[in-house]
Amino acid sequence: MRSDVIKKGVPAAPNRSLLYALGYTKEELEKPLIGVVCSYNEIVPGHMNLDKIAEAVKGGIRAAGGTPVEFPAIAVCDGIAMGHVGMKYSLVTRDLIADSTEAMAMAHQFDGLVMIPNCDKNVPGLLMAAARVNVPTIFVSGGPMLAGTMNDGRRTCLSHMFEAVGTYYAGKLDDAGLEEYEENACPSCGSCSGMYTANSMNCLTEAIGMALRGNGTIPAVYSARLRLAKHAGMQIMELVKRDIKPRDIMTPAAFHNAETVDMALGCSTNTMLHLPAIAHECGIDLSFDMANEISAKTPNLCHLAPAGNTYMEDLERAGGVYAVMSELTRKDLLDTSVLTCTGKTLGENLQGVVNRDPALIRPIDNPFSATGGIAVLKGNLAPDGCVVKQAAVAPEMMTHSGPARVFDCEDDAIAAIYAGKIVAGDVVVIRYEGPKGGPGMREMLNPTSAIAGMGLDKDVALITDGRFSGATRGASIGHVSPEAASGGPIGLVQGGDIIDIDIPGRSITLRVSEEELEKRRAAWACPEPRIKTGYLARYAKMVSSADRGAVLE
């Protein structure tokens, strides 16, 4: 066993003495040591139940003949971090999580790992660590939150809550109405109830083969979630026995499957940061161009919040991610020969799976749209590309031309939106918020929600070198690459410049001559970094552009 280096022989006697200090017995040390990476904390609603998930996992490990050893991973709540300096510390935790988990796993030589994440950067960070360490690993998340219910019976969620703030500033909602949203939008523990980033990544962990069926969709409060955790604990022992490692599962074909499911589900645009970063750890290049190729042939089958009025609990009832994958196999859009954490192929896993709600998971012959939920646009404003969740864009905004309203930070843009300075037809440009320029590439849920809450989501577009929450809807175009701080053309835009957006045509154009852009480029100077000390300053020096997954170099 891999753990023999700390358990067997005379040279390991000091190591054993420390293991005995932990209370482990000789009998326990004769079994495989399984690291249980638990992201429990008391500040993230999606993580407040993970201690229960960890206990269930450990029960499954013991039942199958292993010895569980728990250690922690951090996690940030993007919703609580939103709208202030805290959001600069969200994306950057992905790499902290990967680095610290790698360090713990390598220092203590576990025979296998069970990863217990739930929220936005926690899932990809642990997937990155799994690829690096490459010992048998399985994932089981904490599960999604239930949808809320308003006093009049309407269902609600976190994206409605953020939009309610914009509605309030527009004078269309009073204090009592705002408070009603506060008290009902998030009714249980779990990752927020729509197809936001956390649920997107947990669903894609199933699609890529690293988690058992139901990982992305069984609600956090269901007892089935604890049973799933126990089965994950049992299954890691089978993976250890058969020496099935993450890189045996996360192959190029598996990543293509994940992107295909991504397009069918209408996942968060943040997947376009995380999948390339995870692939990078596997030695696989997952380019922006590949996303468009997959989107072009993958129908969008689901419209969960914020694109529609259905939620994760509804997707679970309809058959979950497996039902979506089953629909995709009807047109041979998935490679079903790939190996998964069940020890079986994807094709074997999908035998007998049915779509139990064709209204929620559209049959592949009757999709919401013929192309996938995410599109990558290119043009002179974004030569290396930018990303939009087209499944959540109103039809009338699929093409749009309008004058730029330019802001050099998110805070100034929010102030202008709340003050009523943005009008129908405008294109809001927020720059110097990319991975390097932010630093940290803040999510822009506050400005997009304000625009939607004020009723302008069908009239105003927003473009940024930052990123968006999975809860964002509307013509919100992020990840503009190169970013402004790296000299990208978004840094040359001036107020009043006309910007043309053509989502079906996959283009974004700044209607300014190349000669004029050259003059502006010659006069351009990068602003002083906003943060010059600490982790963010180090991060800014090492981080790559968004089109490459914002990986550290």
Image: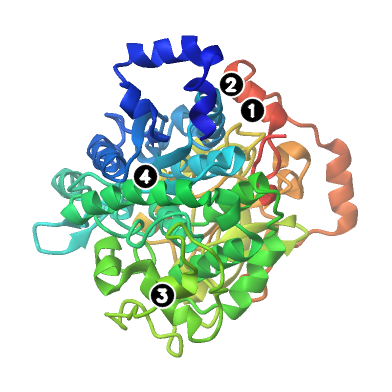
Which residue shows up at 29% across the image and 48% down it? 229
Q: Residue furthest front?
A: 10
Q: Are marks 3 and 2 in contact (CB under 8 Å)?
A: no
Looking at the image, tell me whether mark 3 or mark 4 is earlier in sequence order.
Answer: 4
**Circle 3 sits in a helix, a strand or a loop, which is it?**
loop
Establish if 26 lies above or below 501. Answer: above
Three-letter amino acid code of the residue under disc 2 = Tyr
Three-letter amino acid code of the residue under disc 4 = Asn
* Cα separation between marks 1 and 4: 24 Å
Mark 3 burial class by Cα count in 10 Å: few <14, some 14-19, many 20+:
some
Q: Is residue 82 left or right of residue 149?
A: right
Image quadrant assignment for residue 320: bottom left
Three-letter amino acid code of the residue under disc 3 = Leu
Q: Are marks 2 and 1 in contact (CB under 8 Å)?
A: yes
Q: Give the numbered dot on residue 539.
A: 1
- Residue bearing mark 4: 118
- Residue bearing mark 3: 350
Looking at the image, tell me whether mark 3 or mark 2 is earlier in sequence order.
Answer: 3
- Image location (x, y in percent) of residue 21: 34, 11
User: Is residue 385 in sight in this rendering?
Assistant: yes
Which residue shows up at 33% across the image and 53% down it? 159
Closer to the camera in the image, 96 or 134: 134
Which of the two marks, 3 or 4, is nearer to us in this view? 3
Which of the two marks, 1 or 3, is nearer to us in this view? 3
Looking at the image, tell me whether mark 1 or mark 3 is earlier in sequence order.
Answer: 3
Looking at the image, tell me whether mark 1 or mark 4 is earlier in sequence order.
Answer: 4
Establish if 126 lies above or below 501. Answer: above
- Residue bearing mark 2: 535
Establish if 83 lies above or below 316. Answer: above
**Circle 2 sits in a helix, a strand or a loop, which is it?**
helix
Q: Residue furthest bottom?
A: 365
